[in-house]
Image (spheres, coloured by chain):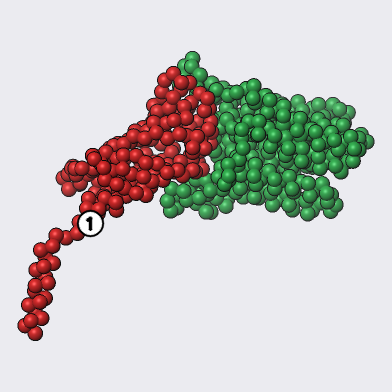
Amino acid sequence: MLTTIRRLGLAVLVAAAVPAAHAADTYTVDPVHSSVSFKISHVGISYIHGRFDDVGGQFTIDKDDPAKSSFELSIKVESVDTNNKLRDEHLRAPDYFNAKQFPTLTFQSKSVKPVAGGYEVSGDLTLHGVTKPVTFTLKGGDKVVEFPKGMHRVGFTTDLVIKRSDFDMKTSLDALGDEIPIDIGVEAAK
Amino acid sequence: MPDFGLTGVAVLVAAIAAALPVLLAAFLRRPLLVRIGCVLGVGAGVYASCAVLGLRPRWPVLEDRDRFLVVLLPLTLVVETAAVAVSRPRWPAWLLRLVVAVAAAPILLHNSVYLADLSGPHSAEWPPALAVLILSLLATALAAVWALLALLHERTADRSVPAVLALSTAAAGVTVMLSGYFHGGLLGLSLAAALAGATLASFAAPAPPSRRGEAAAPLLGVGMIGLYTALLLGRFFGSLPTASALCLLLAPLSPWVSEAPGVRKLRPGLRAAARLIVIVVPLILVVVNAKMRFDAAAASHYGPFEP
């Protein structure tokens, strides 16, 4: 009996000595401090800039095993804003985004690799009812800030270029550029 | 910037492709083939025009326009061809037309934010009860206008009713274009051109004066579904105001004026002209209103610059 108690006590001590496995942290995207902006070439001489005002999503970050991390972003297409109401209405119509048929633009990561200064993320981008694989480098995530008190937040930035024709958005390809540079800056909090 | 040259070519192609089967059947002097040619001609005209415009349906079918071209238009062509082939008794054809009228809106609005929970549970803009109510109203409106037009066509026994439908669909196309859905409007113009082409070609069909309208009768179903589609797409996927959509849907009924007691005594030719004049006025008003709204919005946003 005494031996059993000793063995049990030893097991508890050993367990306490081993550092606990770090659970992954799940963060929710903070739409107030996140922005997704894009620009599109107009008749080949300059760019028109726009943004999406309604961004959401969730990040799961596993510092110990980054491959288990995941990134999910969801953008409301209705929130497209190019600083021109008439143009935005046309962009929401089926000639472009078809917001009534495809109300959200989503990204879901499939693999995450740690790289210098961030992560290389590959996943599926779904836009206009078409899903295509994309890969980009997500910079940041190295520090967690407590702001305001009690809320921990992490931030990332990235930029990527997509071809809208890949997503069956082919209206006015002669006048409006096919390649769309996108800039993303997101904060997520828990 | 819209390519008006290409649009003009597409309209011409739609009219010619729609007219050819009718002219061929008329040359063979086969009245039944003329009527089937009218139905299939409109289909051929629309698809040929869409090919010119690059409006090929995506596969799998995901969008409103694609569902029209791949599901609703073929369904209508099959029903109207069957209605021509089995002309007596009439009730089976009207039963099938009723099925098309009920199915049209759900087909066009399928998996859209109105009917489906695309942004999470219970996110559909129309809760189930409201969806049933709206879809029922839409089907009733379509079936009622369709039946009244068919009745008017029987009474008039000429080609003015298909011509009225072609004019209304053309006006709907232009209005939808000016309401922020350019390709939806192009589809309307293609339909209108195909209807006009088949209607004009039906003049070549040999028939006694009292039965001249029979050749073009099958155009009513395809024309009605075409007009309805253009308006539904403009209203629910573009920015076409409800009042304009309703006005354009009901406009083809205005030629009923020619059946008023005083007007009925006029010669058939004068009554046919009256029917066309009565339709042109409301259509012009709706198109001008849409153009004024477009210009006002463009001026407030762009000043002297093109959108």
Is residue B83 shown left or right of residue A8?
A: right
Chain painted red: A
Is residue A79 shown left or right of residue B58?
A: left
**Residue lying at the far bottom of the rendered structure:** A1
Q: Chain of mark 1?
A: A
Mark 1 secondary-structure assignment: loop
Q: Residue at x 74, y 48 (%)?
A: B78
Q: Amino acid at mark 1?
A: Ala
Is residue B70 shown left or right of residue A166?
A: right
Residue A5 visible? The answer is yes
Residue B299 locus on image (x, y percent): 49, 19
Residue A95 locus on image (x, y percent): 53, 33
Chain painted green: B
Residue B34 locus on image (x, y percent): 85, 39
Residue A83 visible? The answer is no
The front one of B97 and A24 is A24
Task: Give the quadrant of the N terminus of chain B.
Answer: top right
